[in-house]
Amino acid sequence: MWSDSPFALPGQANSYFYGYTRLLSLREAVLGEFVPSQTQVGVFTSQAQVSPGMASDYTLHYKDYGCRMEDLHQAMSEIRSIRIQVARGSEFRGYGPASIALSGVLALLVAAGQSRWMAGHSKHGIVSYVAVWVSTAAVALALTGIETFARSRRVHSGFASEMMRSATEQFLPALVVGCLLTALLLRVAIQDCWMLPGLWELIFSLGVFASCRFLPRQMFAVGVWYLAAGLYCLAAGSADRALSPWAMGVPFGIGQILVAAVLRFGFQESLE
């Protein structure tokens, strides 16, 4: 582009000037400052030669632009940090009571169906039992995730991403531990898998307790429910060491309905 002009800038001065015009374009995009048009730049190049002093001036502009960009990046980083801190200190209203209550009803229905199926089949494997409840948990998680995403966008608007990330950070460790523990027991101690319902409920209670700080205070009672249910299932199941569908259906069915009730009415009390 520049070689077509009879006054093309020689050597290093030309590269300085070309780079400087690129920086001016970026400055206008980022800082909203005025940038000469290509026609104006062409007039400049056709009427003047670039001296070593002008090249030094361009170098100073390079440094000035770098300082401003550094300040801009620092300011944006501080804004992101503030948004994260605000999200962590605010109540999360993205969880939808409808999907969570539906997951509780689903747990009760699956327990009833599995109990009836097991009564008609003398042989039933541990792997099939676990597969049924892992699939049920996946469906419930998908339903909750879809409603949470849509509700967070509506309720928290500009802070939706930060709020959902903060909520996920609180509960995700419990889910990961539950998955890893299940895989480990199935791999090296399948004879002890009768403990899985109680262990799942204990781990779930830890996730509920971790989430209590940005949910209504009544959610602590739900954590206690899951904790008590897990301990009871471990104590009661130690006698025959058998897997019961109701050891999953009742704790999670009632527990999820309690969570939905707290989400439905707990936030209203916090506003009063």
Image (cartoon, rainbow, N blue to C red):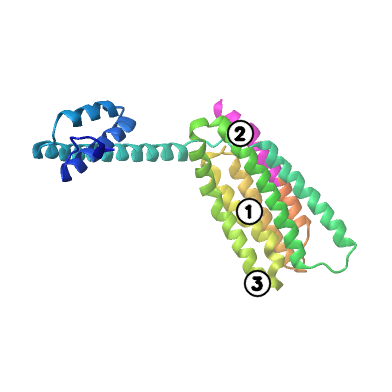
Q: Tell me the crowding category of disc 3: few under 14, some 14 to 19, or many 20 or more residues within 10 angstroms, Cα based.
A: few
Residue range of the region highlighted in magenta in the rendering:
255-272
Please name whichever residue, 56 or 47, is drawn nearer the observer in this view of the structure.
47
* Residue at screen point 56% across, 30% down: 155
Please report the residue visible at 80 percent of the width from the left and 48 percent of the height from the top.
109
**Residue closer to the observer: 54 or 212:** 54
225 left or right, relative to 49: right
Amino acid at the residue labelled 1:
Leu
Q: Residue at x 67, y 69 (%)?
A: 186
Disc 1 is placed on an element classified as helix
Disc 3 is placed on an element classified as helix
Q: Quadrant of the C terminus?
A: top right
Q: Residue 187: which disc?
A: 3
Q: Amino acid at mark 2?
A: Gly
Q: Is residue 265 magenta?
A: yes
How far is the residue under mark 3 from the one under mark 2?
42 Å
The three-letter code of the residue at mark 3 reads: Arg
For label 1, the crowd category at 10 Å Cα-Cα, with few meaning under 14, some 14 to 19 and many 20 or more, is many
**Label 2 Cα neighbours within 10 Å, binned few <14 / some 14-19 / many ≥20:** some
Residue at the disc numbered 2 = 266
